[in-house]
Amino acid sequence: MVVNTPDSPITAEVIFVIEATAANSAYIGELKTNYIVPTLEYFHGGALEDGVGSGSVYGIVTYQSADCHPSLPIATWGPFTCPQDVVDTVDKIQYIGGHAESRACITEALTAALSCLEELGRSDVPLHVILLCCSPPYSAYAGGLVPPGAPATVEQAARLVGERGVKLSVAAARRIPGLVALYEHAGGELHTAQQRNYAKDPRHLVLLRGYSLKERPPSPAPPPVPDIQTDVYGQGRGAVSVAAPRVPPAPFPRAPGVSAVGAVAGVAGGVRNTWLTPQRQTLYANNSALLTQLAQPSQTCNVCQ
């Protein structure tokens, strides 16, 4: 039995926006098992079956990073009326590229998702865009020249999603602050979404709007740190310090027969008062014969007279 499914199938148009970079290849298995399949089961009204639909229409938009140029960073799949076809298509997507980038083209992906919903042409059913990723978005349009009328920033794209009446949900493998802001720009109530925990892993970010999944208990809070910090000074700051008694220094050991006065004055016990003064050496003690001759007084030369 599928948990948390409505009593009857829900007719809706759902676009899955999936990051198809190499970074997301490590998480797509978790995202598919924990969020894509349960979402399909929610709108289908039960377990997925081959070749069987319930009236809902699905589509997939994949996007990459800016290093895919000159190719387009987005691709579209569908439409599908059978939810099992969505799962099979997710398994066939190639998750490549993005090695030199830490962000991805979410602005272009949201614009493409809105175009897919417009082509489907139904406004009497709920419209959903579900973002599954692991990378933050570029702040501006990174897919080349901005088409006329297309949003130039990711904030504009998110606001356009909300203005079209589309409900944006986020299921990311990492808790990225930029995705939280994206959810709010699209019209989502962050405080209400954070009251319910749908994340399978505490590291995942799951913000749903317009539907629900299996609710999980909130992550336990870390235990408080015990206040057992030791005082490095040995006493509290407010304590009154007590001065320790002064101990006189130990006398310096001297040889027998030498008094303190004699050691200072250098007149007792045969101790010289110049015992630290080095002996003077004779200047030019080992001079060579040439230096000795040059040191003698010069004699008058008979030729120079």
Image (cartoon, rainbow, N blue to C red):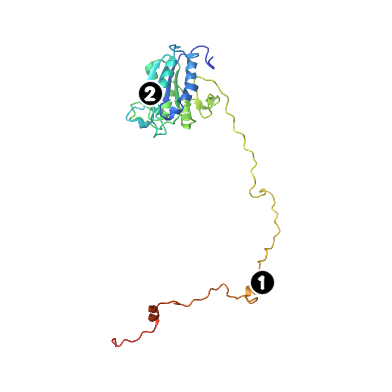
User: Whole-Å distance between the Cαs marked 1 and 2?
Assistant: 99 Å
The kind of residue on which mark 2 rests is Ala
Depth check: 35 or 111 in front? 35
Circle 1 Cα neighbour tier, 10 Å, few/some/many (<14 / 14–19 / ≥20)? few
Q: Residue at x 40, y 80 (%)?
A: 292
The x and y percentages for residue 246 are 69, 60
The kind of residue on which mark 1 rests is Ala
The x and y percentages for residue 223 are 61, 34
Depth check: 99 or 210 in front? 99
Q: Residue furthest left?
A: 303
Q: Nearer the viewer, mark 1 or mark 2?
A: 1
Depth check: 156 or 74 in front? 74
The x and y percentages for residue 300 are 33, 87
Label ID, residue 260:
1
Find disc 2 in the rendering and name its residue. 112
Q: Residue 101 occupies which quadrant of the picture?
A: top left
Q: Residue 153 occupies which quadrant of the picture?
A: top left
Name the N-terminal-most of marks 1 and 2: 2
Q: Are marks 1 and 2 in contact (CB under 8 Å)?
A: no
The x and y percentages for residue 185 are 46, 28
Please tell me whether mark 2 sits on a helix, a strand or a loop.
Answer: helix
Q: Is residue 250 above or below residue 5?
A: below
Please tell me whether mark 1 sits on a helix, a strand or a loop.
Answer: helix
Q: Residue 165 occupies which quadrant of the picture?
A: top left
Work out whether residue 115 can be spotted. no
Work out whether residue 37 can be spotted. yes
Q: Is residue 114 left or right of residue 264?
A: left
Q: Is residue 256 left or right of residue 11?
A: right
